[in-house]
Amino acid sequence: MKHSAFTSLRRAFVAGVIVLTPIGVTVFVLSWLVNMIGGRYSRYLFFWLPEDLLNKQQLALVWNIAATIIVLLAITLLGFLSRYVVTRFFFNAAEKLMRRVPLISVIYTTVKQIVDTFSAQQRAVFDKVVLVPFPREGSYAIGFLTSRSGGEVQARTAEDVWNVFIPTTPNPTSGFLILVPRQQIRELDMTVGEGMKLIISGGAVVPPWPPAEPAAPGVPPRPGDSEAPGADSGTGRTAVAERGPHPEPPPSSA
């Protein structure tokens, strides 16, 4: 019984030490900072106060704490300026220098355009996620609609073609620019961010797709199908036409 009581007291003491140790260390460090910083710089920071007010023993702790807070804020402000203002100044100077060197300027400008294209701020350059036949008929690739071609490209083609960027997997910074006839493009409901995740993961991360409209029994809807029900978006032929005409009923026996 005595052994059990001693064990309980020892455990309680150890638990108390564990609880008080972080608090004690924190108080010790703060007290050391206040005495070191405040005791050394309080007279310099509050030189404008009357001497008798600074020498009051009752207010010594107040001046030390105030001086410590001011010094810590000054250090933080200096770090902020050195991190954002000075760093940005040197970065802008280095960027200007790179743009003036003949060969480096071409490489730097190209890489920067690629990075800006795939950054979150410039992701709006991709209009929609689309599905296009690539690299051959019968297989499809995920791409991003960048623009409706227009200009000389549109004038020299017999069809209405759109610009589609096909990224590579898992590195989407390279890919293929293909001009696809409008009728061969299927617009998907997923966002550009979801399309990026699908490409970078190599198809492992598939975004959920709740159908916008209830599907017919046994026939899942496909995004981009704008033809009549039962029509195939690629050929325009209906499922009934592919199955052939309905057989005529056998003649009834007399």
Image: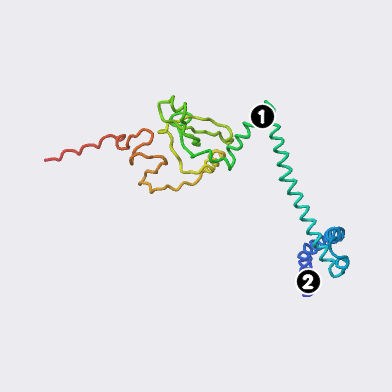
Q: Quadrant of the C terminus?
A: top left
Q: 156 or 222: which is nearer to us?
A: 156
Residue 28 placement, left or right of 135: right
From the viewer's perspective, is residue 155 above or below residue 238? Answer: above
Q: Secondary structure at mark 1?
A: helix
Residue extending farthest to the left is 254
Please give the name of the residue rendered at 46% of the width and 32% of the height, measured from the top-left corner.
162
Please give the name of the residue rendered at 41% of the width and 41% of the height, measured from the top-left corner.
222
Image quadrant of residue 84? top right
Residue 245 placement, left or right of 161: left
Q: Position of residue 229 (x, y in %)?
A: 33, 41
State whether residue 245 appears in this view: yes
Dot 2 alpha-carbon crowd within 10 angstroms: few under 14, some 14 to 19, many 20 or more: few
Q: Position of residue 125 (x, y in %)?
A: 53, 38
Say which amino acid is labelled 1.
Ser
Q: Position of residue 72 (x, y in %)?
A: 78, 56
From the viewer's perspective, is residue 76 above or below residue 86? Answer: below
Say which amino acid is labelled 2.
Leu
State whether residue 142 appears in this view: no
Q: Secondary structure at mark 2?
A: helix
Q: Which residue is mark 2?
A: 9
From the viewer's perspective, is residue 97 above or below residue 86? Answer: above
Q: 88 or 181: which is nearer to us?
A: 88
Which mark is drawn over residue 241? none
**Label 1 – label 2 distance at C-alpha:** 74 Å
Please give the name of the residue rendered at 71% of the width and 32% of the height, measured from the top-left corner.
97
Q: Which residue is mark 1?
A: 105
Dot 1 alpha-carbon crowd within 10 angstroms: few under 14, some 14 to 19, many 20 or more: some
